Image: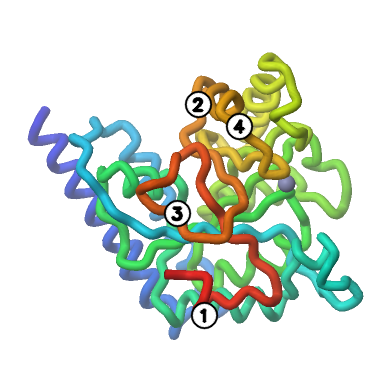
């Protein structure tokens, strides 16, 4: 049994290393024709998370880390939105998004899932040299149209937090078919609640319903576990975090423009909100 466990750990580490090396190499050679290869890499990354979830947790070690978590809402033209409006603050243009992803690749960042983030944070695995988490909130279809191809080009993975009541409800929102396609390509689909409420203003039973129902809907679509939440409107408090934890969620994310470190509560992880003006060189460690 012990030998099997050791071999499994070695296998997982080897797969992780392979995924990281491939990601690092992806930049100069990636092209539209390599999309099938890209999907293989993304699938490999995903399988690391699922296959290692059954391993017994090693003893916790003190860890120190700086891992930026980026959050995007819309990828669309921003002309016409004054910079004081939320429409501008929640958008980047397709060309800016492409430049930001190219910058990450040029600076040798490796995109990781939140499951991998948690393993690094708990000292259960060594991450890549420069890990980063990319997230998208609110199911906006323009992200699928303008962002997904660029992620694939760079062999990046990302976490897509979806509001399940909006699935298939309008042409501007992700469809269930698109969500399945994202998941099958190695993207991580996680919860942004059912109805996008202020969780802090709900009863405990209503909070649990938002957490449980959104998870069931996503897991039925993807066949993969949901254990990460983006708090709608970034609203949370100790009571909400307690219910989120009781319901089996491992991380919760808010907006706070700095990288996550070992000092952060996993249920209150900071995310850097991305706009056309965000300078990655200044925002990242
Ligand atoms: Zn939202």
Vertical comparison of 212 with 53: above or below: above
Mark closest to the chain's N terminus, 2 or 3: 2
User: Disc 3 marks which residue?
Assistant: 260
In the rendered image, which quarter contains the C terminus?
A: bottom left
Extreme-top residue of the structure: 205
**Residue placed at 78% from the left, 41% from the top?**
167
Mark closest to the chain's N terminus, 1 or 3: 1
User: Disc 2 marks which residue?
Assistant: 245
| Alpha carbons under labels 1 and 2: distance apart | 35 Å
User: Disc 1 marks which residue?
Assistant: 103
| Cβ of mark 4 under 8 A from ligand 1 | no
Where does residue 131 sit, x and y in percent of width and height?
Answer: 39, 62
| Alpha carbons under labels 4 and 1: distance apart | 35 Å
Is residue 200 among the parts visible in the rendering? yes
For label 4, count other residues whose C-alpha is less than 10 Å away and answer few (under 14), some (14-19) or many (20+).
Answer: few
Mark closest to the chain's N terminus, 4 or 1: 1
């Amino acid at each position: 049994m012990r030998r099997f466990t050791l071999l499994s750990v070695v296998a997982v580490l080897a797969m992780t290393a392979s995924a990281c090396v491939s990601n690092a190499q992806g930049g100069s050679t990636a092209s539209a024709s390599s999309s099938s290869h890209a999907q293989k890499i993304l699938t490999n990354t995903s399988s690391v998370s699922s296959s290692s979830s059954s391993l017994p947790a090693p003893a916790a070690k003190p860890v120190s880390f700086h891992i930026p978590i980026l959050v995007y809402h819309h990828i669309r033209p921003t002309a016409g939105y004054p910079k004081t409006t939320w429409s501008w603050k929640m958008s980047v243009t397709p060309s800016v998004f492409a430049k930001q992803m190219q910058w990450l690749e040029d600076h040798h960042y490796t995109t990781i899932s939140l499951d991998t983030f948690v393993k690094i944070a708990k000292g259960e695995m060594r991450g890549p040299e420069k890990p980063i988490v990319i997230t998208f909130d609110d199911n906006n279809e323009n992200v699928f149209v303008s962002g997904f191809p660029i992620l694939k080009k760079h062999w990046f993975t990302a976490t897509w937090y979806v509001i399940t009541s909006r699935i298939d409800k309008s042409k501007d929102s992700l469809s269930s078919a698109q969500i399945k396609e994202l998941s099958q390509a190695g993207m991580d689909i996680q919860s942004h609640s059912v109805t996008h409420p202020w969780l802090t203003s709900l009863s405990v039973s209503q909070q649990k319903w938002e957490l449980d129902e959104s998870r069931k809907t996503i897991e039925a679509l993807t066949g993969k576990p949901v254990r990460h939440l983006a708090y709608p409107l970034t609203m949370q408090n100790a009571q909400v975090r307690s219910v989120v934890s009781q319901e089996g969620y491992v991380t919760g994310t808010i907006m706070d423009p700095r990288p996550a470190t070992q000092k952060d509560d996993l249920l209150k992880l900071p995310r850097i909100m991305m706009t056309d003006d965000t300078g990655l060189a200044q925002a990242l460690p």
